[in-house]
Image: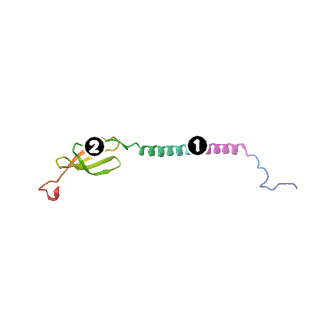
């Protein structure tokens, strides 16, 4: 008469075949969780690496060497270039483009118009 209700009674031990299946399932669960964590850490490492690459050092202080007598009238800053527009000593307009990472001159363009071409092209 002192029997416990069925939910409180101890479970009967599993037969050997069911115990092997249970152990195999626990092992599979552990391997799956391990693979998932390795993949998660790989993705996080790739994100951190890409953020580090995006913030590569750029020229924050340096010298930009312009030609003698060049007078700067306009400047602009892009992600990887510094643009200076100005006039030479002879009054010709020029556009100088510098690499932002190194400070080296990347482009030197004369600005002018074409005559006799419709639309100036």
- In the displayed structure image, the side of residue 12 where residue 111 appears, left or right: left
At x 54%, y 42%, the residue is 38
Q: Secondary structure at mark 1?
A: helix
The spot of residue 37 in percent (x, y) is 56, 44
Looking at the image, residue 91 sits to the left or right of residue 105; the answer is: left
Q: Position of residue 95 (x, y in %)?
A: 24, 48
Observer-nearest of 49 and 30: 49
Q: Quadrant of the N terminus?
A: bottom right
Residue at label 1? 34
In which quadrant of the rendered image does the C terminus lie? Answer: bottom left
The extreme right residue here reads: 1
| Residue pictured at 66% horizontal, 44% vertical | 21
Q: Residues within 10 Å of mark 1 (few under 14, many from 20)?
A: few
Horizontal side of 14 relative to 89 (left or right) equals right
Instruction: Tell me which segment is drawn in magenta.
Output: 14-33
Magenta-colored segment: predominant secondary structure:
helix
Give how far across and how far down residue 71 sits, in percent: 23, 48
Of discs 1 and 2, which sits in the foreground?
A: 2
Whether 26 is among the magenta residues is yes
Marks 1 and 2, the one that precedes in the sequence: 1
User: Tag 2, which secondary structure?
Assistant: strand
Residue toward you, 41 or 110:
110
Q: Nearer the viewer, residue 94 or 41?
A: 94
Quote the CA–CA distance across marks 1 and 2: 50 Å
Q: Are the residues tagged 1 and 2 within 8 Å (C-beta)?
A: no
Q: Is residue 49 magenta?
A: no
Position of residue 120 measured from the top left corner of the image (x, y, whole percent): 16, 56
Q: At x 29% / y 44%, what residue is drawn?
A: 98
Residue picked out by circle 2: 106
């Amino acid at each position: 008469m002192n029997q416990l209700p069925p939910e409180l009674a101890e479970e009967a031990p599993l037969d050997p075949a069911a115990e092997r299946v249970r152990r195999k399932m626990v092992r599979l669960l552990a391997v799956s969780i391990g693979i998932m964590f390795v993949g998660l850490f790989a993705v996080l490492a790739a994100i951190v690496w890409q953020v580090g690459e995006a913030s590569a050092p750029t020229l924050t202080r340096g010298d930009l060497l312009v030609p003698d007598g060049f007078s700067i009238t306009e400047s602009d800053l892009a992600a990887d270039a510094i643009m200076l527009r100005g006039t030479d000593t002879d009054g010709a307009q020029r556009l100088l483009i510098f690499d932002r990472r190194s400070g080296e001159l990347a482009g030197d363009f004369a600005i002018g118009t074409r005559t006799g071409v419709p639309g100036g092209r």
